[in-house]
Each structure stands twice: as structure tokens, then as C-alpha cells.
Image (cartoon, rainbow, N blue to C red):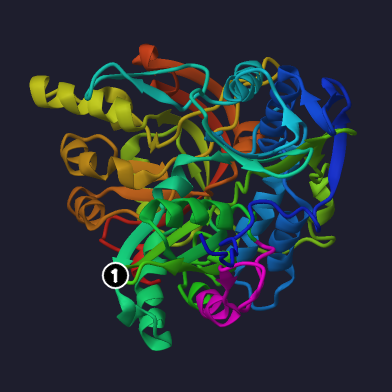
Amino acid sequence: MTDFEYTPIYSLFDFKNIEFDKISKDYISEVQAGNSKLLKIDAKALEAVSQKSFSMINYFFSKSHLQQLSNILKDKNSSENDKFVAKKLIENAVAASSGIFPLCQDTGTASVIGEKGNLVLTDFDEKKAISQGVYNTYTQENLRYSQLLPNSVFEEYNSKTNLPAQIDLYSGKGRSFKFLFVAKGGGSSNKTFFFTENKSVLNFEKLKKFLEENIKKIGTAACPPYHLGIVIGGTSPEMNLKTLKLLTAGALDHIPHEKNNEYLALRDKEVENLADNICLNTGLGAQYGGRYFCLDSKVLRLPRHGASVFISIGVSCYAHRNQFAFIDKTGIFLEKKEKEPSIYLPDEEIDFKSPVHINLDQPMEKIRKKLSELEVSVPVLLTGDIVVARDIAHAEIMNKLEKENYMPDYLKNHPVYYAGPAKIPECCASGSFGPTTSARMDSYVHKFQEHGGSLVMIGKGNRTPVVKKACSKFKGFYLGAIGGAAALVGKESVKKVEVIDYEELGMEAVHKIRVENFPAFLVTDDKGNDFFDKS
């Protein structure tokens, strides 16, 4: 066998520019094995690093992420909506930093990527120990269980622990165990796009056209402003998508912006600038108009098989929940997070367009009449009773409607909010209570409105044309809540929560909530106007 030159595609971890806090020195020792000294790690160490990491990332952000949000407030070219949403999102981080209200009500799928050095000794099931940490965090804290297990192809149930976690462990060198912990919500996961193209796309003008067509398709349902990732190439589809997740999590920031001798992968500054400009010109801004569709764009070019050019596009949303950690002979270390996010709020008050107050404690006809007087994109503050229902509840109601021609009065008399709450802390009336992606309920709207239900809807993101048509025909409305402000809404706006139907569905049950000054924007009106048509 002849010698060959080996160059890795990229390295998994590079901690040169990351600050860490030491959380423990327990459960770690060194043992001699022949001529080598091994780092021995107890199962409790992996359990602890997992538990603490998933707790941290559900309540705290990195300084760099908060600084990027703060920069929106300082940018003279930011729209009023950009600034309004950015300020609310920083206020949300402040609300979450008490450790009671998680940053987002969708506390995510727990994902763990680890690299174990060849001189690290473990004599236990590593994935089981990491899973125990996930179990501890999600069952002991005010987080939400989102994982559904199959009984069959068609039947499923909630695990009520947020397990299973996705755990991928790799081998490395040395006496350390390195980790990336990610809590990935459904919104940003659902906005992952994969394409199989050919050599012709590897041309600046053609790639520009491709990105212009596809970046805007991400829409606003996944809670912008985003961290955008684009991966071009890859030795397989699976490798491309795995790399995309690492890229959006900030785990590949160390890859150079030019061809280099260290890695076969490279980042491309010219294409990143192109993607940044496309994002700035979408018109979607920080959810409801402006420049800040994304906080940054990262483009990674990988090796590829000559027959295919794989391209993936994805985002990490405002709830940018990623945590680096490592264990070595000196202890367990977690990436430092910002414990005082209030320092990123502006020193002076920012003047925003005064929102219109909407009283929900009046007949639906009067609520709709008031909304009909407003133009799309106008901010509103809602006070009164709202019904909360999402995917499974909508399916149950539709089933009953089709079989019995029955539409419940609560959908006729109150606005419906597409949301799924996190657990309610003992101290408070509500847990984190942000919106879920509205488009998942689009197929129900025409039938529900035809029978007098869902005439005022509240959620996040753009809807398909069927919703605009239904609202025009049945004189309905769609309001956009601020995606990502779940802690702020739960702490300040929601005053009472009660289950009123389908209690057995848990988080998916139908709730009725009492709100005060709940912020939203008029997106679709009863005349066929839609904010996203202007963008």
C-alpha cells in the first residue's frame, strides 16, 4: 500500500474563541494504563454536563447573539418593525433569564454531538448517561415534551420526557470529551431545504438566482431574525445535512474563507455577502417588515461526487439554543452565557407606531368590525379571552365537524391562537406561551370559517393562499404574533390558563387563556389584503 496525503473535510470542534465556565470537578479521575495516562469519566459526569447544558440553553443566550439583536436597534436603516421586534426579543431574553420561563415554548428536540478522545476511559453506556441528563432537565424544569413515539404507522403518543434525544458520538484524539448540545424547535427544523442540483449551478449568476428564489421561501414562521446556513456539496445527502446543522449552530465558524491546507471544506465570503444582501432585501425583516430577515449568513463549500451538487439551506431561529462543553482532567466546562441580557436594551426609549387596542370581551362581530377598520401590518394589543388550539385539536374538531356537522362555540365566540404552552411554573399563571407555525392549520381554515369558527386567527408566519381566499369570502382575519417572545408573553400578557376541551391531549389540548396587551400585527384582513403579498 502506498502512502497517501490525508486532509480532513473539516474538524468538529475548535474552542479557541469560546469562553467557558467550570461547573464541576467531580466524577473525573486519571488512571495509568501501561505507558498511557487515561482520563476516566464516570456516568454522572455525562449526566451532569447534559442536564446543565439543556437547562442553560433554554434560558440564556450567548453574548454574540444578543449583540447582533442589539445592533438592529442601533442601525439607522432598520425599519420600525425591525426595531420593535428586536426590542421585544431582547426583553424576552430578560424575562427568560430568571430561569423560570424558557426562551421559547417549543423547548426543542434534544440533540447531542460529541467527540471522545482516544485516551478517555468510560465503562458505561454513554448515550444512556447523556439521555438521563436530558430526562432530568425536561422533567424537572418548566420545559415542554415534544417527542411522539409510534404505536403504529398512524398512531402515536407523547413520551412525556422529551426523549428520545438524538445523540451522535465520534472518536477523536487526546484526554478530553467535547460536546455540542442543541435544542432544535420544530419551526426552524421545518425550514430545512435540500436540493440535488448539477454542475451548472456552480456559477455565480446562476447560484445568485437559485438563492434569490429559495431563501425567501423560508418565510417568517421559524422566528426570524435567523442565522442562515447554506452548504454546497457533500459526499452524500446525509453528510450535507449534518454539516448544515453544525453550520447554523456556529460549530464551523473556524473554517477559513479560502482554500487552505488544513481542511478540504472552505467558507466563501463573496457568496456569504450575496446571501446577506438577499436577506436584507426580502422585505420580510424581523418578521413583519424591514431589513433583518437574518442576523448573518454562512456558506460552506464541501467536496462532492462528480454526479451531484447537493445544496441545503437552513436556519437557526431567534431561539439560538446551542451550547459547547467539554470534560478534561480539570473538570466539566460549559460555554459561558450572558446572565444579564438587560444590558443589551437601548438606553433611550424608541418611538414606535402606537398599537391599536382591541377589546376581545365583546361579540365576535364587533371584534371583526374593529379589525376591518385597520390596514394590514398595523400593530395591535389584544385584551380578553382567546382559545388556544393547534394541530391535533384541529384534526379532532374537523373529524367531529365532518361526522356531526358540529363546530364548537368556543371557536365561534373567541379568536383562536395557534400555540402549545410550556409547563406552568408553580409561581405563575402561565408558562412560556409563544405561537406555533400557522401554516400547519391552513387546510382547516375554509371549512372552519364556513361554519362560523376561526374567524380571527393568531399565529406566526405566512399562510398559503387558501387562507387569504377564505378570509375574503367569510370576512375573517389573521393576526401575526411575535415568534420567539414566548417567555415575555407568558410572563406579562397571559393572566389565566384553563383546559376546556380534549384534556387527554396534554400540550395539544384546547385551552382558554386570558390576556392583557398581547402584542400582534394584522397580517390578513377581510378584504383579501395580506402583508406578505407586499414583501
Disc 1 marks which residue? Answer: 307
The quadrant of the image that shows the C terminus is bottom left
Please state the extent of the stretch shown in magenta in the rendering.
253-277
Q: Could you tell me which residue is drawn at 57 percent across and 77 percent down?
A: 268
Q: Amino acid at mark 1?
A: Ala
In the image, is 72 to the left or to the right of 156?
A: right
Question: Is 76 placed above or below 337 here?
Answer: below
In the image, is 433 to the left or to the right of 41?
A: left
Q: Is residue 315 magenta?
A: no
Question: Is 98 placed above or below 3 here?
Answer: above
Of residues 354 and 231, the one nearer the viewer is: 231
Of residues 473 and 96, the one nearer the viewer is: 96
- Asked whether residue 158 appears in the rendered view, the answer is yes
Q: Could you tell me which residue is drawn at 68 percent across and 67 percent down?
A: 72
Residue 343 in percent (x, y) is at 84, 53
Question: Is 311 placed above or below 136 here?
Answer: below
- Asked whether residue 376 appears in the rendered view, the answer is no
Of residues 185 and 124, the one nearer the viewer is: 124
Residue 182 in percent (x, y) is at 60, 41
